[in-house]
Image (tube, helix red, strand yellow):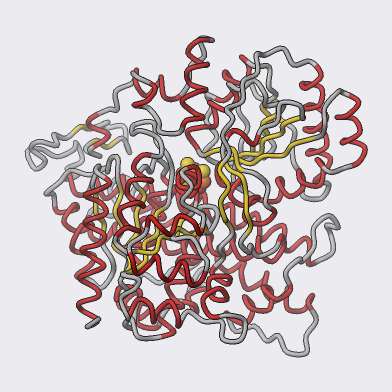
Amino acid sequence: LNIKDITICDATQQMLAKARREGVETAFDRAANMKACPIGADSACCKHCAMGPCRLNAKDPYGKVGVCGATIDTIQARNFARMVASGAAAHTDHGMAMVDLFREVVNGHIKEYRIKDVNKLVQVAESIGIETEDRSVKEIATDLYKELERTYTQVEGEIPFAKRVPEKTLEVWRKMGIVPRGAMREIMELMHRTHIGVDQHYENITKQSSRTALADGWGGSMVATEISDILFGTPTPIAVDVNMGVLKEDQVNVIVHGHEPNMFESMLVSVNEPSLVQAAKDAGAQGINLVGMCCSGAEMMSRHGVPHAGNFMSTEAILVTGAVDAMCVDIQCIKQGLVSVADCYKTPLITTNTRAHIEGATHIEFDDHEPQKCTDEVVIKAIQRFKNRTAAIEIPDIRNTGIHGFSHEYINYMLGGSFRASYAPLNDNIINGRIRGVAGVVGCTNPRIKQDWAHVELVKELIKKDVLVLQTGCSQISLAKEGFLTPEAAYLAGPGLKEVCETVGMPPVLGLGSCVDNSRILIAASEMVRVGGLGNSIADLPAAGAAPEWMSEKAISIGQYFVASGVYTVFGTTFPIVEETKFHKLLFDGLEQQGLGKWGFSADPYEMARMMVDHIDKKRKALGI
Ligand code: BF8
């Protein structure tokens, strides 16, 4: 395979060429050598019991059934449900870790972290009906953690953030019986119902998939975002350098990669610790350079302006620079293949989380109660590696500056100003047609498609058609590397969006943070409904979502919670389904008829853009604008 066909990221191309010269294998090579299993890709196999595994024929989906009698629709709905369950579990477990930390901080058991954003604390508390007037921070925070714990543990009744859902959307959910209870209950029930011989109606299974996914979007993910803002600060726009050129040859380079912000916040303290900075200088370095990747990188750049080196498909490639002195990871999206690449360059790969060890990596357990114990040790290891660098170093000289850190609070402020902070100006601009609609473009990169290409082409098409794009996760980094997250990129937008961007001084593509921060998009959508003029539910909004290069089960959970919230959501690359089956018709059409959103799929980003714009136009027409 020609490297230019693998990725459009110049830095990654340069490192893949070096990897080839040096005989180092990456996920791109493995993807080329391992054809995707065609039966699995169609979701036409079932391995949930030992009477099988059973394989159905995607070309003749109703020609046979599994040994138990399961039809293609049951099999697909079950497989899909288990992806939702796993993805929702990942986000909600992350959110739960943040609640655990918050509780310990509020109760004074941890001194290293504190409530940094009291305004946000008050705002979140009030949004779910907690009394804040004449009460101390500790009283409000105590009520808040107790209330938010219900997001996970609540056996009956609606989760706290259901209070933030627009009335009409909530009404649809209530009628369908999909308002989520605690995530533990929803995920448990979904796992139960997809066991052999339990729920064998694809529609009923999908109902529980929606409920579980909503427990992620309006539950686990939203709690992760809100608690992280309260503890570490709500992002406001900040100029940040992105791409591999943020590594510095004459400094000790430490990369953080993963998802939960607590370890990375502590790493920020460790790399600035005077004794460690001195130790780095004693080792001949100019200093210690902290850099983020993937979602942890997105959190750190949004809150602190820490440079970001690249997205999911660049995590092996960056080790090939030879300049990484330690890569420190916690949970999710950490390829096991990093171990062998790190080995080739004698880079310490350090796992820190009790839930995520990797064979062959060094494990240094991170403990919220003495966070620096772990992160200091990582920095010491990095300094040692710097001192003993032997690998040939080559750092791509590419950096792209962009503006990141658009929380939904800031979007409010930016558009309305400090005296009338509101989404009204956004709605006005949609109603008057300068902005055609809003699209969320999010998600992973995947070696089955040219890295970054579909993200970039899709977003280009959307802004050209005056669609304002909101971004999170690895997709945000794809566009940042192409220079779209700058106010100067407004010239690439259609005339209406361009005018709005130039008036406000904002980029046509707004970066909202990590993948759990997709919850910021949900809140922004609720605000747009609340302000008025664009219908009564999220499903009425001229809006759409996309994950053009998705790969993880988390992405499926996100997709399903956007769909269940009322959003048309288009995925690219591949979709685990057999077309023209009843289950396919349900996801791609039936759910919309029930008052929710619906799924779409296209492997072609230009076609994706057309589908999304058509949908936005359809909604505009229904609104009479
Ligand atoms: O949660 S976009 S590759 S890093 S799953 Fe993973 Fe996908 Fe990146 Fe963050 Ni999200």
Q: In which quarter of the image is residue 211?
A: bottom left
Query: Looking at the image, which residue sits at the far bottom?
Result: 134
82 sits to left or right of 621: right
Residue 473 location (% of width, % of height) = 50, 49
The answer to whether 364 appears left or right of 486 in the picture is right
Q: Which of 205 and 341 is in front in this view?
A: 341
Q: In which quarter of the image is residue 252?
A: top right
Q: Which residue lies at the image location 21% right of the left edge and 49% below the top edge?
A: 607
Can the viewer see residue 365 in this picture? yes
Can you say which quadrant of the picture contains the N terminus?
top left
x and y percent of residue 67 in the render? 19, 36
Residue 404 located left or right of residue 467 = right
The residue lying at 45 percent from left, 58 percent from top is 509
- The location of residue 200, given as percent across then percent down, is 23, 53
Pick whichever, 571 or 79, lies toward us: 571
Relative height, residue 34 to residue 508 (above, below): above
Residue positioned 93% across, 37% down in the render: 275
Please state the total of marks drawn on the protein image: 0
Q: Visible in this render: residue 565?
A: no
User: 495 left or right of 276?
Assistant: left
Percent x, y of residue 38: 23, 30
Q: In this view, does 163 lie above or below 506?
A: below
If the image is split into quadrants, where does the C terminus sit? bottom left
Q: Quadrant of residue 176?
A: bottom left
